Amino acid sequence: MICNNNSQDCDICYDHKDQITLYADSDMKSVIYQFNLFLPFEKILKKCNINEFNITYYESEIDAKLDINHLKKPQTYDTSISKKIFVRLDNIDSGIIKIIDLNLEVQ
């Protein structure tokens, strides 16, 4: 179980996973691959009230920690290479902040 319906428990239950990977299959014709960075968090937080979370995405861990330079369009993030994105989950009610690695893998 990732989290239950009680919003205070969502951050605690999520601690089991600090890293997530999204995959794109290479067809050797595409130069740019598009990822919807929000998809895994819709699934992970589906038992919680997702509106209690502010979810932002960053290209560096320091930006995520400082809450600066967030990605403007995480639903359509383009990359030509495998890379790591940093996701900041802010629980609006509890004030708990969690930084998670999101690996983007082009295969």
Image (cartoon, rainbow, N blue to C red):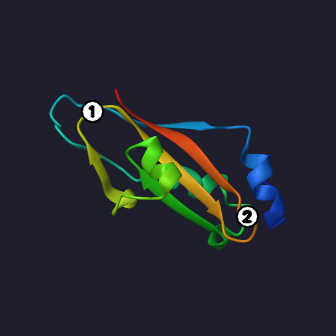
* Nearer the observer, 58 or 26: 58
Identify the residue position indicated by label 1 in the image. 81
| Residue 5 visible at all | no
Using residue 37 as the reference point, say whether residue 18 is left or right of it. Answer: right
* Nearer the observer, 34 or 79: 79
* CA separation in Å, label 1 and label 2: 33 Å
Q: Position of residue 99 (x, y in %)?
A: 58, 47
Q: Mark 1: give few (<14), some (14-19) or many (20+) Cα within 10 Å.
A: few
Identify the residue position indicated by label 2 in the image. 48
Q: Which of marks 1 and 2 is nearer the N terminus?
A: 2
Residue at image position (37%, 45%) is 59
Using residue 24 as the reference point, say whether residue 87 is left or right of it. Answer: right
Q: For residue 104, what is the image quadrant? A: top left
Q: Where is residue 51 in the image (x, y as percent from the top left)?
A: 63, 73
* SS for callout 1: loop
Residue at image position (52%, 39%) is 101
Give, as a three-letter code, the residue at label 1.
Ile
